[in-house]
Amino acid sequence: MDNWFNSKWFVRAVSLAFAILLSVFVHFESSSTQSDSRVPSKTNKVETLYDIPLHIKIDSDRYVVSGVPETVNVSLEGTTSVLTPIVMQRNIELFVDLRDKEEGSYTVDIEHEKIPSELSVYIDPKTIDVDIEERATEQFPISVDFIDEDKLPVGYELGEAEVKPEVAEVTSAKSVMEQIGIVKVYIDVADLDESVNNREVPINVYDNQGNALSVKSDPESAVVSVDVDNPSKTVPINVTTTGELAEEFDISSMTPKLDDIEIFATNATLENIDELSTEEIDLSEVTESGTIDVAFDLPEGVVVSEENETIGVEIELEQTRTIDDVPIEIEDQAGQDVSISDPENGMTNLTISGLDKDVSELTAEDFRLFVETDGLTEGVHEVPVLIESPDDVDVETEIEEVTIEVSS
C-alpha cells in the first residue's frame, strides 16, 4: 500500500479521478440552478397599478403630439420584498420616446424607467398610435359669456365685463390651430345681485361649431370683473278704479299717501315707463271714506322696494241723502195766532250733501227749519223757510216757501 502512494502514477490517477468527480458535481449543480430559475417562485406576487401618468419625450419647442393617453395601467410581478416598495411609492416612470422622429404617424412602444430588473413589467396598452405635427402658437382675444342671464333677479342688469388678460396665447398643431373659432370664459350670473370682482375662471377654446378643443392656452385661466346694476327711476303714482259707487255717493278726493315712487328695472324697461299705476280699486265696494291699502300693477320686469309693495289711498266720499218730515217752526208770533196751512202737516223733507264723515250720522234733530212772522198782518202769507244746519253741509228743502195764516 505504501508503495502505491510512493508511486507517482498512482497519485496522478487518484487526482484525475477526484477532478472528474468534482467536474460532474459542479455540472449537476449548475443544471439544477438553471432549471429552478425557469420555474416561477412560489413567493412571486402580481400587483396592478392604475392610472400611471404617461410622459412624452420629444422636442416640444418644435412638435406637438396627439394620440398619447394621459395614463396607462401597469402590472408588476416579482417577490414581495422587491414589489411592495414600488407599489407603495408608485415611483415608476412610463414614457414614449419620440425624440428621433419627425412629422408623421407612428406606432410606438411605451417604455419604462425606475423599475427594478427583478420585476416583470406588463403595460396596458403596450403600444400606441401617435401623430406628430409641427407646433404653432397664436394669440386670440378672450370673450366673456354669461350663463343663466335670464335668471338674474328682476330689475338687475349686467354692465360691461372686464377680463384680464384680454388675449390668450394658444399653442397646438397647425391643423388644430386652423379650427379655432373662439376663446372664451364663462360667468354664471343666476341669482346674482352684486358685482363680480376679480373672479378667476378657466379659459376654454372652441372650434367654429362650438366643439371644445384640447389645446394649451397661456394663461390657463383669466380674471373677470363685471358690474351688476339695479337701475331705478322715480315716477308719479296713478290710482286706477273699476266699478261704480252707490248712487248716494260721489268721490270728493282720492289721494295716494305718496306722490311718486322709486321703481327698479333695466334701463331699457325704465325708458318706457312714465308713471306707476295701482291695481284697480273696486268702487262698488267703497261705502265710506277712509284709507285703502292697494298693491301696484307692476309691469313685467319692474319691482319696488319691499316697504313700498302696497300704498295707502285716502278716499273721501261725498254723500247725498234725504231726511224726511222735518218740522217747520214758527217764530215771533207776537201775540198773533199763526198757523201753517201749506203744507198741512207743517213738515218738509231735507236733502243734505257733504263729506261722508260729516253727513252719514246726521238726523232731523241736527237741523232747524223755521219761518219768521214778525211784522206780518192778519191774513194769508207766503214766507220763506229758513234753515239752521251743521257747518260743511249743504241743505236743500223740498219746499222753499210755506203758506201761513195770521189772525189776531
Image (cartoon, helix red, strand yellow):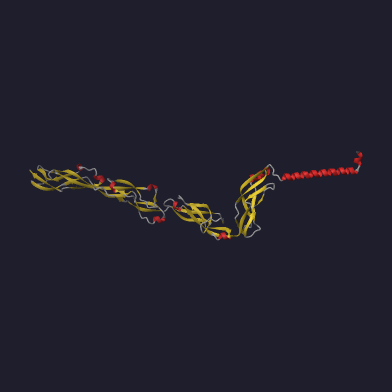
Picture layout, residue 104 above or below residue 388: below
Where is 64 relative to 4, above or below? Answer: below
Instruction: Name which quarter of the figure residue 137 lies in.
Output: bottom right
Where in the figure is residue 313, as x and y percent of width and height? 32, 48
Relative to 241, 49 lies left or right: right
Query: Which residue is located at x 86 percent, y 43 percent?
Result: 15
Q: Is residue 20 left or right of residue 287?
A: right
| Residue 393 in view (yes/no) | no
Quadrant position of the N terminus in the picture? top right
- Residue 66: percent from the left, percent from the top? 59, 56
Q: Residue at x 50, y 56 (%)?
A: 144
**Left or right of residue 312: residue 47:** right
Which quarter of the figure has residue 104?
Answer: bottom right
Q: Position of residue 255 (x, y in %)?
A: 31, 49
Using the rendered image of the protein, determine whether residue 234 is visible from the camera's viewpoint: yes
Q: Quadrant of the C terminus?
A: top left
Measured from the top left, where is residue 237 in percent x and y? 34, 52
Q: Residue at x 63, y 48 (%)?
A: 74
Q: Nearer the viewer, residue 280 or 74?
A: 74
Which one is in front, 403 or 186? 186
Residue 56 found in image quarter: bottom right
